[in-house]
Image (cartoon, rainbow, N blue to C red):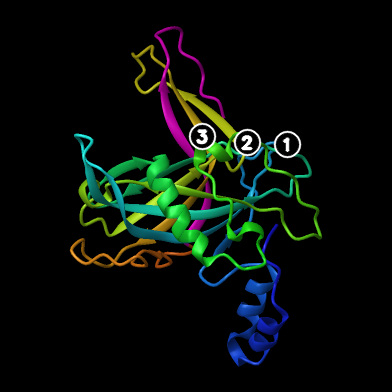
Amino acid sequence: MTHRPDRRRFLAAALAGAAAPSVLAQEARGLQPGERAVDPADLPLDRAGVWTLHFRYKPPRIMQVDGFDGRGNPARQTVWYLWYQVYNRSGEPVYFTPEFELVTRNPPTTHLDEPQPYIFDQIKRFEDRFVSAERPNGEYNLMSSIQISRRPIPPSLPDALPRVVSGLAIWTNMAERAPRAAQFSIYVTGLSNGVATEQSRPLPQNNEVITLIKRKTLQLNFIRPTDDNRPEPTDIRPDTANGPAETWVYRATTRLQPKGPAKEPVE
């Protein structure tokens, strides 16, 4: 089940003057304050039969949690986490096998989502404090990347409230792994079955063929204009300086094939 829009909030928005259209649009889509929605978009590399899930999220939060150091001893650590929801308008159940890759720009570092159960449970308890009383059991039923991939995302009817599925992506020890990181992107794969490939030979005399596997990916851009000595939970903000913070792209991963007859590039 999802939040049902409160009519009193619709009325308050209508009386708010110039801000009313954006507030009404947010409420009409069932979004809560701070949430951002990303609708599917058609891309040139899409082929017939490509589906893409709808995505909602709140900018990543910074949180101090109980964890363990490298020797297994209890220790406090700094984590970044992304609260998100997905829903499916494709008309058929589809599996969402997510991968969340956080890439910082300066210094350049790469970090994959780490759904450690002990840390996940602490964040889940914190997020459940903000759940509306209308939601059964007073919780979002937040899932890790592993849990959310076990069952298909059910389809939502075109004119009905979406049947959202909620999750958390978590990156641990970020103060040590990415100190002073002020700009970063999160790449979310698994939201679509869109895949494209391209083969090329890097040098004429080289018989090894590079295969680029491109997957339809959601890119989320963020800034963190604070220092590591005084982190606040809401330091991280969407980066809209050069356009929308959210972009659909086909992102490539590189795979080196064994030596053999060179193949012509696939267009």
Q: Is mark 2 in CB contact (under 8 Å) with mark 1?
A: yes
- Secondary structure type for disc 2: loop
Q: Is mark 1 in CB contact (under 8 Å) with mark 3?
A: no
Neighbour class for label 3 at 10 Å: few (<14), some, many (≥20)? some
The front one of 56 and 211 is 56
Query: Image quadrant of residue 112?
Result: top left
Label at residue 263: none
Residue at x-position 69% and y-position 84%: 8
Label at residue 214: 3
The answer to whether 178 appears left or right of 253 in the picture is: left
Q: Earlier in the sequence, mark 1 or mark 3?
A: 1
Q: Is mark 2 in CB contact (under 8 Å) with mark 3?
A: no
Alpha carbons under labels 2 and 1: distance apart: 9 Å
Magenta-span inclusion, residue 101: no
Residue at the disc numbered 2: 193
Query: Which quadrant is home to the C terminus?
Result: top right
Residue at the disc numbered 1: 49
Q: Nearer the viewer, mark 2 or mark 3?
A: 2
The three-letter amino acid code for the residue at tag 1 is: Gly
Alpha carbons under labels 1 and 3: distance apart: 16 Å
The three-letter amino acid code for the residue at tag 2 is: Asn
| Residue 241 place in picture, x, y as percent | 40, 68
The three-letter amino acid code for the residue at tag 3 is: Lys
Write down the region rendered in magenta.
Answer: 245-267
- Secondary structure type for disc 3: strand
Q: Is residue 23 above or below residue 164?
A: below
Q: Earlier in the sequence, mark 2 or mark 3?
A: 2
Residue at x-position 72% and y-position 36%: 48
| Residue 160 place in picture, x, y as percent | 79, 59
Q: Is residue 29 visible?
A: yes
Q: Is residue 164 above or below residue 97?
A: below
